[in-house]
Amino acid sequence: MVRTKKVRTPLIAGNWKMHNAREQTRQLIGELKPLIDGLSDVEVCVCPPFTVLAVASETIGDAEISLGAQNVFWEEKGAWTSQISADMLLDVGCRYAILGHSETRGRFGKVDDLLAGRLHYFGERDDTINIKARVCLAKGLTPIICCGETIDERQAGKTDDIISSQIRACLDGLTPDQIETLVIAYEPVWAIGTGEVCGSDEANRVCRLIRQTVRDNFGTDAGNGVRILYGGSMNDKNAEELLEQSEIDGGLIGGAALKADSFATICKAASFAAWNFYI
Ligand code: 13P
């Protein structure tokens, strides 16, 4: 049996969304630490709400867990009520920032139903994601840029066009060196929080399309280096099959990141999937 390590180190990032106050944050990270202690060949990250980033950072201490935020604003400081800058995130210990999650892009349409199309959830768009990515990279925060199609787009056969245009627009103007370091998450909107996971072959196919789009527009090194995660109903049962796909370099996990044991099981599956085995 021969083992060779894959080129890209897998990343498992837990997107806690709007869950966990200080006490639950201490508890969840406290439970997670021993479960992933000594785990090699995988990078583990948690992305709690802004209000508990400081508590999360303290609780992580010197454990091998990276901290990420769920959003960032592009201005440095000033009269921007409600917004959080990259410097503030770095100050509290963040290494990553999730950008353009479908829940901030407003692609569910629920608010459309309520307000007859006048308002999206938070108005995030490819061009605002692009500005945020530029600022993050300039400041030393690594963006996790989300893309994904809705069920209507998929059923209309538009998945590939939607995904490649999101990728081109979100990465516009970045250098190949910058792109090599960042993370893209493919999160089909219909698979988020629904329990309806995208099949591993199809998830791998779309991740390959993303990588090829990066290669075509920004060069081979950028395409080979960028880490591409899958997100959408990934859990401790289906993680192994998804993570062993050649183009999937990790996961962006929602619900299953809220329990230490299920999140740790996914981290272990990624650690195992970091290796190729040959007879
Ligand atoms: P679920 O894992 O709950 O489907 O959420 C995925 C997600 O949106 C991660 O960003």
Image (spheres, rainbow, N blue to C red):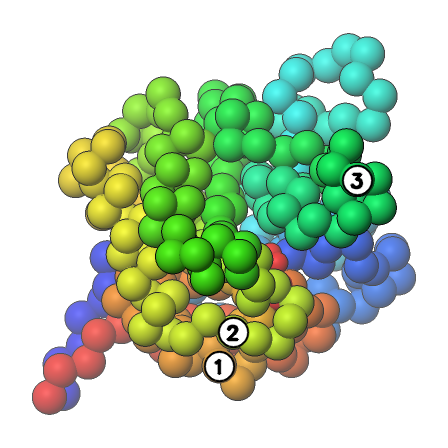
Q: CA distance from mark 3 to mark 1?
A: 38 Å
Q: CA distance from mark 1 to mark 2?
A: 8 Å
The amino acid beneath tag 3 is Ala
Residue 100, percent across and down?
A: 57, 40
Q: Residues within 10 Å of mark 2 (few under 14, many from 20)?
A: many
Q: Of the numbered discs in the image, which one, if any, rests on residue 197?
A: 2
Residue 74, percent across and down?
A: 62, 21
| Relative depth, front residue between 179 and 203 | 203
The residue wearing badge 1 is: 238
Q: Nearer the viewer, mark 3 or mark 1?
A: 3
Q: Quadrant of residue 225 in the image?
A: top left
Q: CA distance from mark 2 to mark 3?
A: 30 Å
In this rendering, the answer to whether 118 lies above or below 207 is: above
The amino acid beneath tag 1 is Asn
**141 left or right of 211?**
right
Residue 118, percent across and down?
A: 77, 32
- Contact (Cβ within 8 Å) of mark 1 with mark 2: yes
| Relative depth, front residue between 57 and 166 | 166
**44 left or right of 17?**
left
The residue shown at (26%, 67%) is 246
Q: Considering the image in quadrants, where does the N terminus appear?
A: bottom left
| Relative depth, front residue between 60 and 77 | 77
Can I make out residue 72 in this image? yes
Q: Of the numbered discs in the image, which one, if any, rests on residue 116?
A: 3
In this rendering, the answer to whether 44 lies above or below 213 is: below
Q: Nearer the viewer, mark 1 or mark 2?
A: 2
The amino acid beneath tag 2 is Val
Q: Considering the image in quadrants, where does the C terminus appear?
A: bottom left
Number of numbered markers: 3
Can I make out residue 94 in this image? no
Q: Residues within 10 Å of mark 3 (few under 14, many from 20)?
A: few
Q: Which sits earlier in the primary sequence, circle 3 or circle 1?
A: 3
